[in-house]
Image (cartoon, rainbow, N blue to C red):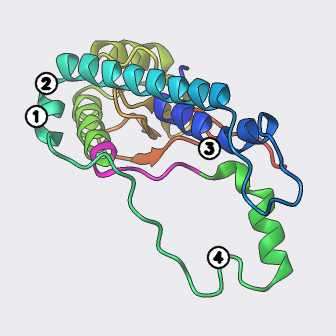
Amino acid sequence: MKRPVLVLAAAALATVGALTGCGSTHVIGSGSAPAPDPQVSASISRMQQEAQERWQREIAEADLKFPEVAKLCAGKSTVPPTPVATAGGEGGTDPENSKYAENHAYLQMATLTESQRCRGEAHAARITAAAAKNTPADETQARTLMTGLAYPGAVLSAYGDGVHFTLSVPGSGGCLTGVLSGAGRIEIHGAYLEGGCERPRGGH
């Protein structure tokens, strides 16, 4: 499944420090920060611009395909909310907590913007309504349902409690994970920082 453009853009931003450090000129004893290589800076800016343009194209395509979602979520903020700091840090001073957090860092997800959450909720409602009318009994029926709803890229897996699915929300960068039923058992979440909407396997 194609990784969301927002994750790719974030990865491009994350390389700024590493790439700049490789192409910098260090002046010993100057006491000032090294100046970034102009070519490296230009390359990073170009990558960011291309990622932004791809994202805008994906949003435009999704809005044409799902006009009701576009109308519902028009004007919603695309800026990620500011994280709220917790006293003493998330892991506290207990080394076991820090070790647990480190081992499960691969499960971290991107924070949803107001727009991503709105679009995710709207698409989840479409899927829930369709599944309530005709709940799929197996992956074949589920594929027919999701393709009919214009989600051909959904990842499907049949289990005892129904057909589970994972989906990258069109034009959003957010994700949906849940069970195809009329019960509305769908989670709206950000993409995993390692990439994609499917839960990564294994720890580090």
**Quadrant in which the N terminus appears:** top right
Q: Which of 92 and 96 is in front in this view?
A: 92
**Is residue 135 placed above or below 120 in the rendered structure?**
above
As for residue 113 lying within the magenta part, the answer is yes
How far is the residue under mark 4 from the one under mark 2?
Answer: 40 Å
* Residues tagged 1 and 2 counted as in contact (Cβ below 8 A): yes
How far is the residue under mark 1 from the one under mark 2?
Answer: 6 Å
Residue 90's disc number? 4
Q: Where is residue 130 in the image (x, y as percent from the top left)?
A: 24, 28
Which range of residues does the magenta coloring cover?
A: 109-116
Q: Where is residue 142 in the image (x, y as percent from the top left)?
A: 41, 20
- Report whether residue 4 is seen: no
How far is the residue under mark 3 from the one under mark 4?
Answer: 18 Å
Q: What residue type is labelled 2?
A: Pro
Q: Position of residue 56 (x, y in %)?
A: 32, 24
* Residues tagged 4 and 2 counted as in contact (Cβ below 8 A): no
State which tag comes first along the sequence, 3 or 1.
Answer: 1
Q: How crowded is mark 4: few (under 14 residues within 10 Å), some or many (20 or more)?
A: few
Secondary element type, mark 1: helix
How far is the residue under mark 4 from the one under mark 1?
Answer: 38 Å
Secondary element type, mark 3: loop
Residue 101, image quadrant:
bottom right
Taking the image as shown, residue 116 lies to the left or right of residue 67, namely right
Q: Residue at label 1?
A: 71
- Report whether residue 142 is seen: yes
